[in-house]
Image: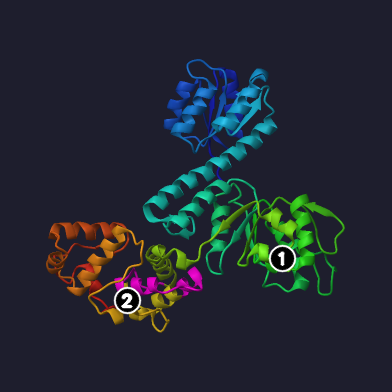
């Protein structure tokens, strides 16, 4: 992994230069500044991931620099260098003002190296979090999760808070709601992201093999153990272990797992030596954890140990407003994977998808979209590409001139679907569509340009004249997909 940039701010040139040389020797790109004001100017030019600053300096001291950095560059980690009399203030700066760490003078260089490495990892995670916030604002996506509904935004905010820590997280929700995607997003936003993410389904492994799968075994530990084998804890060292369907784990093994979580040490099956492990554990279940405790299939003490933070994934039926965005995301993803031309869902297809209750949640939606992508030979997936999947066909009983929208559909979405359905009805005659909608032709073109930018319509390769088949929206005249 390439090292980041470190800015050293200190009014003693000898200290600044010696720190710069040492950090450069460890693989970092470095720069120096003699005080806080010049340090701020250097930040704009140098864009460091970490700032190492003395506390007492002329013009702008380390605390003032920290406050400015928090305001202007919150993604940058700031480490303060303190004399004996400023340790208490440095601690307060960490607790109240967001300093990453402090180091006392004279500097322990081994500790400096460790702290800077962690600060660099933290800064990278923060940068990615900020990038994801922009991604969410612009496209309704957060890492591997997609959706702009209020329930999903609350989950994104919670993930942002828990990802940088090493706390255990329990993911709950119905089967197919995306618990493993959520776990991967937490891992990818954490300082552990460059190490392994190991996932294991506790319900898919026979009880006799589960202990070996988790903790590994020595040669000869049991019949067929011809060689030493590392378990998931060792494979995930420095990274994240995801235990899916944790409530299905045998109760006898849950006690051993609890001890490992508390002691951070494992013993391979058939081994005599305890080995330290550094692993963050994320767990998931589609059952009610408290119900499993009452039924005696899930240890209460293990639940408390895993349940430091709970993230509950909502079923798809409770966030139907996310279906257009999620479905379009899946179309783009799966069309690329299968080398198919599909790029867009017609309004009729989107309406059909939104009318279904999705008992299998996102996993079920993905399967439906994948089939449609494979059989569709044009850029537009229409309603008939979803058959024979038993989606409710309400639009047929209502007639072609009506659309039904769920209560709470955002106004912008209502407008977009009405415009696209009217274009479909007029066979892409924009002049006639504008008359029916009682808007100007210019307004209609502006709306369609916006929908292209948002990804609801394919981009033009070449602008064609108004109301000619050269227009990509012509494909919306429906059902002529294949």
Number of the label disc, if any, that sits on residue 382: 2
Where is residue 295 drawn, in percent x and y?
A: 72, 68
Tell me: 319 left or right of 258.
left
Residue that appears at 45% across and 21% down:
37
Tell me: 390 left or right of 482.
right
**Can you say whether 31 is above or below 363 in the image?**
above
Residue stretch in magenta: 339-367
Q: Which residue is mark 1?
A: 294
In terms of sequence position, does the residue under pointer 1 or pointer 2 come before the other?
1
Tell me: 219 left or right of 242.
right
- Residue 202 found in image quarter: bottom right
Number of the label disc, if any, that sits on residue 329: none
Report if residue 357 lies within the magenta region: yes
Q: Residue furthest bottom?
A: 388
Tell me: 346 left or right of 390.
left
Res. 228 visible in picture: no
Where is residue 29 drawn, in percent x and y?
A: 53, 35
Where is residue 384 drawn, in percent x and y?
A: 34, 81
Res. 146 visible in picture: yes
> Is there CB contact under 8 Å for labels 1 and 2?
no
């Amino acid at each position: 992994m390439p090292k980041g940039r470190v800015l050293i701010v200190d009014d003693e040139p000898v200290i600044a230069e010696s720190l710069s040389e040492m950090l450069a020797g460890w693989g970092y790109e470095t720069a120096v500044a003699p005080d806080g004001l010049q340090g701020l100017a250097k930040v704009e030019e140098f864009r460091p991931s970490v700032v190492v600053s003395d506390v007492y300096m002329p013009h702008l001291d380390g605390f003032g620099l920290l406050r400015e950095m928090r305001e202007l560059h919150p993604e940058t980690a700031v480490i303060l260098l303190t004399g004996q009399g400023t340790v208490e203030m440095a601690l307060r700066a960490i607790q109240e003002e967001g300093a990453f760490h402090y180091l006392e003078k004279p500097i322990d260089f081994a500790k400096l190296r460790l702290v800077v490495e962690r600060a660099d990892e933290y800064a990278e995670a923060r940068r990615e979090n900020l990038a994801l916030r922009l991604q969410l604002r612009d496209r309704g996506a957060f890492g591997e999760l997609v959706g702009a509904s209020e329930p999903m935004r609350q989950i994104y905010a919670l993930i942002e808070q828990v990802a940088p820590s090493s706390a255990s997280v329990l993911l709950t929700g119905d089967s197919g709601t995306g618990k493993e995607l959520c776990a991967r997003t937490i891992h990818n936003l954490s300082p552990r992201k460059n190490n392994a993410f190991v996932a294991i389904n506790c319900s898919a492994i026979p009880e006799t093999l589960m202990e070996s799968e988790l903790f590994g075994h020595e040669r000869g530990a049991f019949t067929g153990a011809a060689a030493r084998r590392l378990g998931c804890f060792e494979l995930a060292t420095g990274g994240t272990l995801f235990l899916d369907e944790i409530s299905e784990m045998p109760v006898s093994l849950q006690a051993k797992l609890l001890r490992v979580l508390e002691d951070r040490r494992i013993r391979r099956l058939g081994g005599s030596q305890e080995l330290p492990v550094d692993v963050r554990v994320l767990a998931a279940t589609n059952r009610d954890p408290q119900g499993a405790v009452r039924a005696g299939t899930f240890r209460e003490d293990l639940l408390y140990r895993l349940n430091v933070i709970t993230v509950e994934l909502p079923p798809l039926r409770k966030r139907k407003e996310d279906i257009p965005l999620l479905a379009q995301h899946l179309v783009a993803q799966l069309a690329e994977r299968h080398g198919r031309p599909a790029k867009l869902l017609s309004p009729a297809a989107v309406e059909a998808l939104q009318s279904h209750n999705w008992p299998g949640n996102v996993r079920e939606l993905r399967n439906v979209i994948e089939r449609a992508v494979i059989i569709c030979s044009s850029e537009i997936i229409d309603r008939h590409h979803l058959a024979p999947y038993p989606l409710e066909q309400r639009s047929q009983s209502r007639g072609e001139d009506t659309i039904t929208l769920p209560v709470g559909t955002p106004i912008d979405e209502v407008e977009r679907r009405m415009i696209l359905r009217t274009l479909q009805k007029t066979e892409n005659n924009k002049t006639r569509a504008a008359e029916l909608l009682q808007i100007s032709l210019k307004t209609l073109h502006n709306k369609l340009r916006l929908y292209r930018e948002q990804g609801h319509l394919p981009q033009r390769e070449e602008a064609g004249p108004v109301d000619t088949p050269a227009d990509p929206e012509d494909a919306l005249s429906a059902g002529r997909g294949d």
